[in-house]
Structures are given as structure tokens and as C-alpha cells.
Image (cartoon, grey):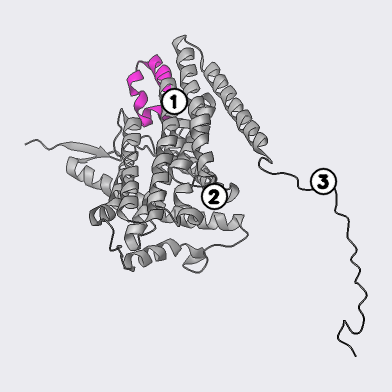
Amino acid sequence: MDLVLSEFAGVSMPAWIDALLRVIFIVALMTIMAFALIYLERKILARFQARVGPTRTGPVGTLQSIADALKLITKEDVRPITADRWAFELAPYMAFVPVFLVFVPMPFTETWFIRDLNLGLLFVFGVLGLNIVGVVMAAWGSDNKYALLGGVRAAAQAISYEIPMLLIIVAVVMVAAGRLAVDGDASAAGSINAIVGDQTTTPYILLQPLGFFIFIIGMLAELHRPPFDMPIAESEVVGGYFVEYSGMRWGMFFLAEYTALFLLVVLASSLFLGGWNWPFGADVGLGLQIVLTFVKTSVLIVLVIGSRALFPRLRIDQLMSFSWKVLLPFSIIQVIANGIILAYGGPDWVVGLVSFGLLVALGGLVYYIMSRKQGEGTRTVQTTPATPRVITAPEVTPVEAGGD
């Protein structure tokens, strides 16, 4: 039997060793990034709130995430007596495994990825959509009304914001197919690595600025990050769908959240900011490509974390209306505009100009809605200052006062 060889990081090796190394690479990267993001979020939020954040555990508090992980591992795993055992215990895995699979087509450099899939974008959103199954299982299996309400909110929010995101992905693939068709390779437009490779001179954020804005908004909603954290709002649903979880099962939900944060930020930087390619090109070497990916993802991560301190939480009706009444129509218009321009052979600058015009229109619409609602529901009780009333005490005789 012939030995099947594969290549990982430029080194040829048997296929089974290649697969094992890739799995180890994913697990190590996922764990390190989750610990780093938890620490980074605490320090950034502390700066926003005039605090210092973790400082005691390890140098400058860098071991705080590891201490939290050890606490979760040793903490008692409690299950409500009325909970559905199978749904309750399998839910964390159903929420975590789909996020883990998103690593497969994600390019960190030109050669560092698990697999370069021609339909990588379809694969990412296909498996990421399964995450909501684990959320609903956790909500239903907990036999808790707050958990169930949080799970229903999470499902509704995921459906509402994934549709505009998918339409924006279609718009990006249309642009990539039009540009790659010049080289006779339009079929690779669904590959994330091919899209990054096409951004040598022009990042797609200049061609699809509206798409970048909608993608970031959808990403915040998908991750349940403020101001779109209604499914886990402590003041309304007491923590949301994982309120009954403790120990490492609770930790798996948070590991999935921070891993998804890292992967979606890498995806955004790959689709719109040029990933490892722009602005230096593919010939700069592996080291600089890693630096480019790191810098771009770090900037987006700081923006995502900063939104938690900058924006107030939306009401559930505002959250749903913003997706269905604002983001969805604009994403549909973006797809139609791309189709018309590309069908008639329009240049790239026309595509970018139209998308920028739509972004300005979206900003104007949001400003109009907010200004129209400003002061709505309030009324003036009194327009003139009240006149003080002088109260004079009546004369009281000594007999009435109880005197002799």
C-alpha cells in the first residue's frame, strides 16, 4: 500500500500525522486565544471604567484566566433535578463543536490553514449556524423559565442577524468572482484564502464599506456582545440560557463564545481588510504575514470589546426592528447593486462608490429614526414655576392649646 503524504507548514509527512498535527494546532490556538481574550477584555474594560483590572495573579495579572480555568475544572457540576438530562448535558458540546470546526478553512497566512476549501465561506456559516441548536437545547433542558426566555431570544436574534450577514457574504463573493474571473479562476470565489489573495492592492472594505459595517453589526449580534446582549441580559433573564450551568459545562459556553469572537474577527479581517495579504503582498514571507493578521485582528477585537463599554443595551423590539427593517433591506439593495454593476462590466470604483453611498444613506436613516424618537413618550407637566404658598397659623387660645 502506498503511503499517502500530506504537507503541513511546508513539511511533507504521512497523512495521519498531518491530521493529528492540525488538530493539535487548533486545540492549542483555541485555548491560548480564549485565555488571552478573557484577560484582554478585563484590562480594556478596566481602562474604560477607571480601574486597573487583574493585577495579583501572575505578572500584571496574566495568569488570572488560568486560575479561572482551574476553578471551573474543580467546581461542582450541578444539574437541576427537573432538567432533561440528555439535552442539558449535551448542549455545551452542541454549542462548542460547531465553533471548533470553523477553524478548518480559516487562513492565518498564505500557507497556515487546516484546509483550503473552495466553499469555505459556505462551510463556515453552515457549521456556525448549528451553534444555536446547543443554545436551544440548553434553554429547554434546564427547565427554567429564564433560561427558556434567553434561548428563545438567542434563536430569534441569530436568525434575524445571520440573514443580512449571509447576504453581505453573497455581495463579497460577487465582487471576488468578478475580479478573479479576469484570471480565469472565478470558481475559487468561495474560498476565503482566494479572497484574501485577491486583495493585494485593494482591500474589499473600499469596495464594500456597507458590507463591512453590516458584517460587524451581525458579528456583535451573533456573539451576543453589547449592545446586542439581550439573550444573556442579567437584569431581565438572569444570565440567559446557561443560567443553570456550573463548572466546566458553563466554561464550555464561554470557551465557545471567545473562540467564535476570535474566528469571526479573523474572518472579517480576511474578507474586508486583506488578511495576510494587504498591503505588502504575498511575497513578504511568513513572519510578516503573521504580523499583519495579528495586527488587523487585534484592532477589531479592541473595537468589539470596547463596544461593551460604549453602547447601552437595546430593547428586544429595537434589536429585532433594526435587523428586519434596516439591515436586511440595505443588504438586499447591496446585492442587487453589485449584480447590476458587475453584469454591465462596471469598474471597481463604481462598486465602492455605490456601497459608500448606501452606507451614508444607512447612517442618515439611523440618525433620522433616533432624532424622531428623541423625547417620545414624555410630556411637560408644568411650564411655569410654581408660586410659593404662604401658610399662616390660626390663632389658638390657651384653653384650646390645653393651658389653664
Mark 2 is surrounded, within 10 Å at the Cα level, by few (under 14), some (14 to 19) or many (20 or more) other residues, namely: some
Q: Observer-nearest residue: 12 or 388? A: 388
Residue most extreme to the top? 344
Q: Which stretch did the figure color magenta? A: 176-202
Residue tagged 1? 172
Q: Is residue 87 magenta?
A: no
The amino acid sitting under disc 3 is Thr
Residue tagged 2? 308
Residue 108 x/y as whole percent: 39, 39
The amino acid sitting under disc 2 is Arg
Q: Residue, x 32% and y 35% (percent of image)?
A: 126
Q: Residue, x 34% and y 55% (percent of image)?
A: 252
Is tag 1's residue or tag 3's residue first in the polypeptide sequence?
A: 1
Is tag 2's residue or tag 1's residue first in the polypeptide sequence?
A: 1
Task: Calculate the distance from the C-alpha at mark 2 to the C-alpha at mark 1.
Answer: 28 Å
Element marked by disc 2: helix
Is tag 3's residue or tag 2's residue first in the polypeptide sequence?
A: 2
Q: Is residue 199 magenta?
A: yes
Task: Calculate the distance from the C-alpha at mark 3 to the C-alpha at mark 2.
Answer: 38 Å
Q: Residue, x 51% and y 56% (percent of image)?
A: 235
Asked if disc 3 and disc 2 are in contact, CB closer than 8 Å, the reply is no
Tag nearer the camera, 1 or 3: 3
Residue tagged 3? 383
User: Residue 32 is drawn in which quadrant?
Assistant: bottom left
Where does the C terminus fall, quadrant-wise?
A: bottom right
Residue 280 x/y as whole percent: 49, 32
